[in-house]
Image (spheres, helix red, strand yellow):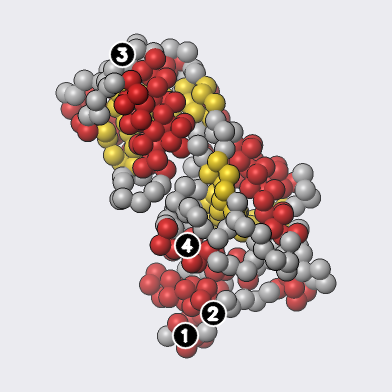
């Protein structure tokens, strides 16, 4: 293993045990070698006659974001129905962190892994060909070798934008993440936004799109203030997530714009906090319970068939509903 990665055995040990003082490029080289050589320390199989621990892993980008906290709670609840415990890992919303979850989960006491991806892309599909049970949550991996549970991004974003148009908006702004040409949440929700404009006969105006580097409240607030200060007229805002939308509500208030009287705002995710903002936030609800139940169900099925002939990978796109609240005049 050390020879394949071009490092010392001690460095390999540090990576396997998640030692913090390892250079990023060295860590990724070791993780790639682990994946390619299918290296594992199968503690469960060694110590338990059944090879089962009753523990599954959940790797999410950031545990302190409202959406991922809610997602984790839903998955824990669904796992509990099946007498399973959940260990949560944080990947830091990075490709390196997701590679670590992929490579090292086999060495921990997990029966399987649910991985929420934002960093890995289509070019990394081969890295998903793992021997242990796994389910992907996220938008970037399509036609991959493992089961995939995704949100209704395009249709949900189309419905959100159409809702603003139905409420009288004709200059709908979009606060979205940066797009790099790959399929991800931001690109898919932008597609839905543009579809709704096309269907309403409203021309797409790039001046109404405010890209942000991180999908946080802070960046949402900055983007909303930037829109307000730009002099570009707008009467509605679709935010790519509720977290961004909550920030946007603050930014619009700072700029002296009233919601929903001057500008109507809608988000996506329907996180719990959306009911308690002032005004309360309209949102797209992607049915978190259904997504969590499906992901856990898929994983339990894969755990049960471990050692048998693997079935064709499944892809599930959740349903959604639009929750109209005060921010759109609901």
> How far is the residue under mark 2 from the one under mark 4?
16 Å
Secondary structure under tag 3 reads loop
Query: Do tag 1 and tag 4 residues touch (Cβ < 8 Å)?
Result: no
Query: Do tag 2 and tag 1 residues touch (Cβ < 8 Å)?
Result: yes
> Front-most of 207 and 265?
207
> What label does residue 125 carry, if any?
4
> How far is the residue under mark 3 from the one under mark 4?
46 Å
- Residue at point 57% right, 76% down? 38
The numbered mark, 3 or 1, whose residue comes first in the sequence reads 1
Secondary structure under tag 2 reads helix
Q: What x and y, as percent, mark residue 276?
A: 52, 23
> How far is the residue under mark 3 from the one under mark 1?
61 Å
Query: Do tag 3 and tag 1 residues touch (Cβ < 8 Å)?
Result: no
> What label does residue 262 carry, if any?
3
Foreground: disc 3 or disc 1: 1
Q: Badge 2 is on which residue?
A: 37
Foreground: disc 2 or disc 4: 4
- Residue at point 70% right, 43% down? 78
> How far is the residue under mark 2 from the one under mark 1?
9 Å
The numbered mark, 3 or 2, whose residue comes first in the sequence reads 2
Foreground: disc 3 or disc 2: 2
Q: Badge 1 is on which residue?
A: 4
> How far is the residue under mark 1 from the one under mark 4?
21 Å
Secondary structure under tag 1 reads helix
Query: Do tag 2 and tag 4 residues touch (Cβ < 8 Å)?
Result: no
Residue 231 seen by the camera: yes
- Residue at point 72% right, 54% down? 301
> How far is the residue under mark 3 from the one under mark 2?
59 Å
């Amino acid at each position: 293993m050390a020879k394949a990665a071009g490092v010392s055995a001690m460095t390999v040990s540090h990576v396997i045990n998640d030692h913090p003082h390892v250079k990023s490029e060295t860590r990724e080289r070791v993780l790639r070698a682990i994946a390619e050589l299918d290296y594992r320390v199968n503690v469960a199989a060694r110590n338990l006659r059944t090879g089962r621990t009753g523990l599954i892993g959940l790797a999410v980008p950031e545990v302190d974001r409202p959406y991922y906290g809610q997602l984790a709670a839903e998955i824990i609840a669904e796992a509990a129905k099946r007498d399973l415990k959940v260990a949560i890992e944080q990947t830091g919303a990075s490709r390196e962190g997701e590679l670590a979850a992929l490579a090292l989960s086999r060495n921990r006491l997990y029966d399987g892994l649910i991985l929420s991806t934002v960093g890995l892309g289509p070019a990394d599909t081969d890295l998903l060909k793992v021997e242990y049970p796994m389910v992907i949550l996220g938008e970037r991996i399509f036609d991959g070798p493992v089961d995939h549970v995704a949100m209704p991004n395009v249709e949900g974003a189309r419905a959100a934008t159409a809702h603003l148009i139905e409420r009288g908006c004709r200059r709908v702004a979009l606060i979205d993440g940066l797009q790099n040409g790959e399929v991800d949440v931001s690109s898919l929700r932008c597609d839905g936004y543009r579809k709704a404009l096309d269907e309403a006969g409203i021309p797409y105006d790039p001046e109404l799109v405010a890209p942000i580097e991180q999908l946080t409240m802070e960046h949402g607030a900055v983007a909303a203030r930037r829109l307000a200060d730009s002099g570009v007229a707008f009467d509605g805002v679709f935010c790519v997530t509720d977290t961004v939308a909550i920030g946007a509500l603050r930014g619009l208030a700072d700029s002296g714009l009233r919601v929903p009287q001057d500008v109507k705002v809608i988000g996506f995710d329907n996180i719990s906090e959306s009911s308690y903002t002032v005004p309360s936030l309209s949102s797209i609800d992607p049915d978190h319970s259904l997504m969590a139940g499906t992901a856990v169900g898929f994983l339990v099925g894969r755990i049960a068939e471990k050692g048998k002939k693997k079935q064709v990978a499944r892809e599930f796109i959740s349903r959604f509903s639009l929750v109209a609240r005060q921010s759109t005049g609901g």
